[in-house]
Amino acid sequence: PEQLRYQGAPAPCDRTHQTPRGPPFGRTTGLLKHALEDDDTSPRATVLRHRTQTHRTRLRADEERHRLRQTWHRLFADAGPDLIVTPAAPTPAIPAGSRSLLVDGAERGFFDQTAWTTLTSHTGLPGLIAPVAHDPNGLPIGVHLTGPASADRLLPAVAEELTQLPALRRPA
């Protein structure tokens, strides 16, 4: 079927315009979006539903993004934190080449694990992930650092200090 045409590999490109040949990307995405079950709330479904949108929806989302940016700005200005530290993911890293992991006995896609890293990315605030520990298998466990606007130099400096803490170094 048409909606499966490009699954698993990038679409061939027309070198003149650098666009996928065949059905327009928006049309293919739209077909996938409409094939979703109404109660599907998976991250994949969310991405497909929001990949195409009306101009009005885009404007409303932009207004909400602006409100969120102002809220974060007020938090940093009023409460005064230099940065916010959150988990990078709810689990340690997965082995190289893996695309999924078991969580409470259920297989989950890797990108289900990335919600913490996108808390502020749409607001334009700087963010950085730093490894701070290792699990028993030697896989890194990270934290996500978020700073106020223009804190681009602060985050790498803090990340460097975190990785130097003796209690957080990788076991020999």
Image (tube, grey):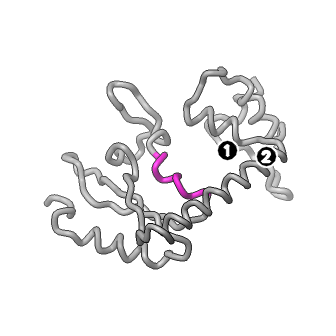
> Who's the residue at 41% across and 74% down the image?
156
**Secondary element at tag 2:** strand
Image quadrant holding the C terminus, namely bottom left
Q: Residues within 10 Å of mark 1 (few under 14, many from 20)?
A: few
User: Magenta segment range?
Assistant: 114-122
Residue 107, magenta (yes or no): no
Residue 118, magenta (yes or no): yes
Q: Which mark is residue 75?
A: none
Residue furthest front as drawn: 78
77 or 165: nearer the viewer: 77
- State if disc 2 and disc 1 touch (CB < 8 Å): yes
Residues at marks 1 and 2, CA–CA distance in whole angstroms: 8 Å
> Who's the residue at 28% across and 60% down the image?
132
Counting from the top left corner in percent of width and height, residue 169 is at 20, 64
Q: Which mark is residue 10?
A: 1
- Left-right relation of 62 to 167: right
Residue 129, above or below 37? below
- Left-right relation of 135 to 71: left
Residue receiving disc 2: 20
Amino acid type, label 1: Pro
